[in-house]
Amino acid sequence: MATWLAGRPDHALAVTLAARGVPASSAWHDFFDAAEGLLDAASIDRALVRLPRSALVGLVADPPAIDGALEHLALVNGSGVPYTSVTERLAELQSREPGAFVAAPAAPAPVPADEQHAAAAAERAFTTAGSLADVLLACLHAPFARTGAGSVSAAERKRLLDTGALGDADDVEDLLAAAAMAGLALPRERQWVVTTQGESWLEAPTAERWTIIATGFRAALPDGVRTPDGGFAAPATWATAYPLDPDWPARLARLRRVGESWGLLSRDDRTEFVWTAALRRGEPADASALVAHLPAEIDRVYLQADLTAIAPGPLAPPLDLRLRSIAVRESRAQASTYRFTAHSLGSGMTEGETAGSIRAFLTELSLTGIPQPLDYLIDSTAARHGLVRVRDASGRTRVESTDASLLEAIAIDQALRPLGLLRDGDTLLSRVTRDAVYWALADARYPVVALDEDGAPEPVHRRAAGVVEASPAAPADTYARLLSLLRSGHGTEGEEGWLGRELEQAVRARSEIVVVVRMPDGSERTLTLEASGLGGGRLRGRDRAADIERTLPVSSIVSVRPA
């Protein structure tokens, strides 16, 4: 195995180490250490219990029916024969769990679901898409904090519950799991962040949103439930796909919850929706049958004199997204209510809207024109917005205002102390960048606007989006240090490399070893030595039988074993 490991390119070797769960901080010094670690009984057991049933059945078949994945896991050699240590652990596991090594009986094909169940599934998918949009929008402006266990923090859950984005605090984990499957959001260190693909998803119609999630869901299914044609096995067989894996029931439960909430899986394994049947066969996701059960999206609202907007149906996502940037959504259903406030309009202006752009948008959106109270509110908010201006000033940021009392309030605001604001005549200066100062003032609810180099207002967008390609680090990067250490170890050419390793360990431990030495006349002699040194191609040690120091050429040593 050491020779096989040493002969693999770095990227393939890193994939093997990652698949076997080897810590990147492992203290291995050479490929013999790596081989010994991978052939350790505990390490083999960890790999075997996570194999799908099909792989377990193939390993114990006579002759073994091996696929390439098992070689990548370093469980079989280049000829497809399991290593001796693997065979021993298989025998032990098979004696304890014989049923795990027998092919599962074929499940009957699911029957098509009736119209009532299909309509209910489509409604669940519609509701879930709206919830995920709320979650991504909240995460887009302020990344969700994660606990040490990886779950969303309680404070973030409460924030989402208060905004009506969730029906239950625990729903957020399933929503983010679906988003991660489709590449819409990613866990980064201690936060969840939205990707650029997630930003695009927010503006997509409901049918396209569902298609992206459905495609990601299928791609994220584990190998044990996938089929060679790119589809997946009948959900009725999923429960027995990983018979030895203690974590599989919890993973399966989440997959089922996600699948059911997006209308992909029925709540019993006997029926199947038309759109899911196509996915299961490996065909592209097609939302046309699902859309037939959804209400049509609209592109107009009623603007009311009480500063509300009434959408008589589900508003098209791009319009909903922009309307929510200048209004607070008070209710979410097939008919939604939005309320305009000075703060909501100010927030939109902070994100780059102007009085003109808001009027143009609402004029096009409204079925009833712009009521006079709303028109006044837009004017008054715009007049106040921009009382505080921030701009670059020769490597510093200058804060200006025509309202001296407002500028004084900013100067003594304890929440803004980290900006290090200092008086400079009728303005304030900070060493912090303009955008950082801008958002600090905006978060403190000051009517701030950013100016460009020419002194004109410039929209500043705050986004927490990641990059679609910024997936978790590639295995080769994760294991770069360990791979370098292994490559720098001594040679691993068969028995010669193994012999050198054994001699090094004996010298390090000053242990007694039995060495077989080939003499000049071709005969062999056995010596028992207490190894004391190794260098220059020679082994030094005390011969216990003769009680003398001996120096032996390593090239003459045939074999070595512990005394």
Image: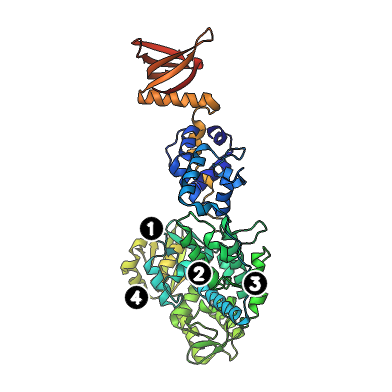
Q: Position of residue 459 (x, y in %)?
A: 52, 69
Structural crowding at the residue carrying mark 1, measured as other residues with C-alpha within 10 Å and reported as few (<14), some (14–19) or many (≥20): few
Disc 1 versus disc 4: nearer the observer: 1
Label 2 sits on what residue type? Arg
Alpha carbons under labels 4 and 2: distance apart: 55 Å
Q: Disc 4, disc 2: CB below 8 Å?
A: no
| 66 shown above or below 491 | below
Which residue in the structure is indicated by mark 1? 148
Viewer-side residue, 450 vs 368 = 368
Residue projecting furthest to the top: 521
Please report the residue visible at 58 percent of the width from the left and 69 percent of the height from the top. Answer: 201
Which residue in the structure is indicated by mark 2? 257
Question: What is the image's colouring?
Answer: rainbow
Structural crowding at the residue carrying mark 3, measured as other residues with C-alpha within 10 Å and reported as few (<14), some (14–19) or many (≥20): many
Q: Disc 1, disc 3: CB below 8 Å?
A: no
For mark 3, give the secondary structure.
helix
Alpha carbons under labels 4 and 3: distance apart: 63 Å
The disc placed on residue 405 is 4
Viewer-side residue, 166 vs 220 = 220
Label 3 sits on what residue type? Trp
Q: Position of residue 121 (x, y in %)?
A: 57, 77
Please report the residue visible at 35 percent of the width from the left and 70 percent of the height from the top. Answer: 410
The disc placed on residue 275 is 3
Alpha carbons under labels 3 and 2: distance apart: 18 Å
Q: Position of residue 343 (x, y in %)?
A: 43, 79
For mark 4, give the secondary structure.
helix
Disc 4 versus disc 2: nearer the observer: 2
